[in-house]
Amino acid sequence: MNESKQEKIAFLFTFIGYSIFGFSFLFSKQALEFTSPFVLLAVRFTVSFLLLNGLVLTGKFTLQLKGKKIKNLLILGLFQPIFYFIFENFGVKILATSFVGSTLALIPIVSLLLSVWVLGESASRSKLFFAVFSIIGVIITTIQQPMEHFRIDGFLLILGAVFSASMFNVLSRRASRAFGVIERTYVMFGLGAMLFSTIAFIEVQNTGLDLVAIPFAAIEFWISILFLSAVSSVGAFLLINYGVTYLETAKTAIFANVTTVISILAGVFLLKETFGIYQLIGSSIILISVYGVNRPAKKFALQKNTH
């Protein structure tokens, strides 16, 4: 496969992956009506890990970890899903969703800066401009939404989520030099299933079996789990890990803000939420920014000093 075609496929897969994430908020919200965040995460990543094992055992994917140093994959798994989901879940509990969304829009610019210093990649001024432009777009989409009181602890948690997601973008690209898409995703989900299940077990021991008995008896919970595990976890992360293999970090990270647009559209069409002029303007800016970062450009700024 030639490089141009490979990049186009990577663009498409990354776009689809982050678009799927836009719908995941709806299913997470539904599932959290029945249980706690840690129980949801434990079930989600356990089912995801079992699905991946099924794909490997049936020969759909090949797993080659023998003889390889998986330390880098374990570090990758700590940042995503462990650190990211812990920071995000508790941050959302403290702060308004609109503020969280605006803060998470820092992921592309932080990823861009980390890719320069960690990977030695270069970034043009136009990429920097459109990365910042996308943040403005996300902020505009939240202008008319209600804002809760600011809390420094919640803000620090969301900044932790921003850093975790940005490190995932960078570390996944670096790990792609030695590990394939399925190998990275497999270790991520295995680590997530193990740690989240351990935390959930302790939580259930302290609060009672209702945290698992009630959701396990609800069909709505399992519908959400099916989407979150099979589509949003296995499907989306495989697509995104494929994308970061062939695209620079700046190009893949900017797609994260597409999630904001998709989540707004999902709310409008599925939950009958309002869609105002600010949402239209902000969504348009985000999509323009995605194009701006991914268009061909000369690389001359922010280049790592290798002298």
Image: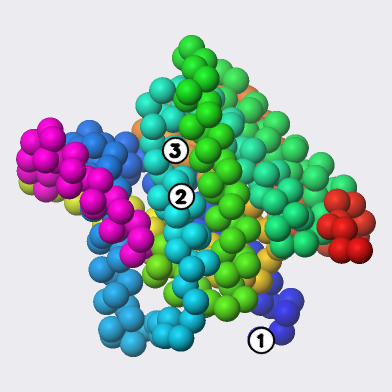
192 inside magenta stretch: yes
- In the rendered structure, which amino acid carries the disc numbered 2? Phe
- Specify start and end residues of the magenta stretch as a single range: 189-216
Q: Which amino acid does label 3 sit on?
A: Phe
Query: Of the residues under marks 2 and 1, which one precedes in the sequence?
Result: 1
Q: How is the image coloured?
A: rainbow
Residue under label 3: 87
Task: Choose between 102 and 274: the one closer to the eye.
Answer: 102
Q: Is residue 238 left or right of residue 178?
A: left
- Contact check, label 2 and label 3, Cβ < 8 Å: no
Location of residue 49 (image quadrant) = bottom left
Residue 243 highlighted magenta (yes or no): no
Can you identify the residue that label 1 sits on? 1
For badge 1, the amino acid type reads Met
Q: Does the residue at mark 1 contact the one at mark 3 (Cβ under 8 Å)? A: no
Name the magenta segment's main secondary structure. Answer: helix
Q: Mark 2 points at which residue?
A: 21
Q: In which quarter of the image is the N terminus?
A: bottom right
Which percent across, then down, holds residue 62? 41, 85
| Within-10-Å neighbours for mark 3: few <14, some 14–19, many 20+ | many
Instruction: Point out residue 257 in the picture as x, y percentages from the top left corner.
Output: 60, 44
Give SS at disc 2: helix
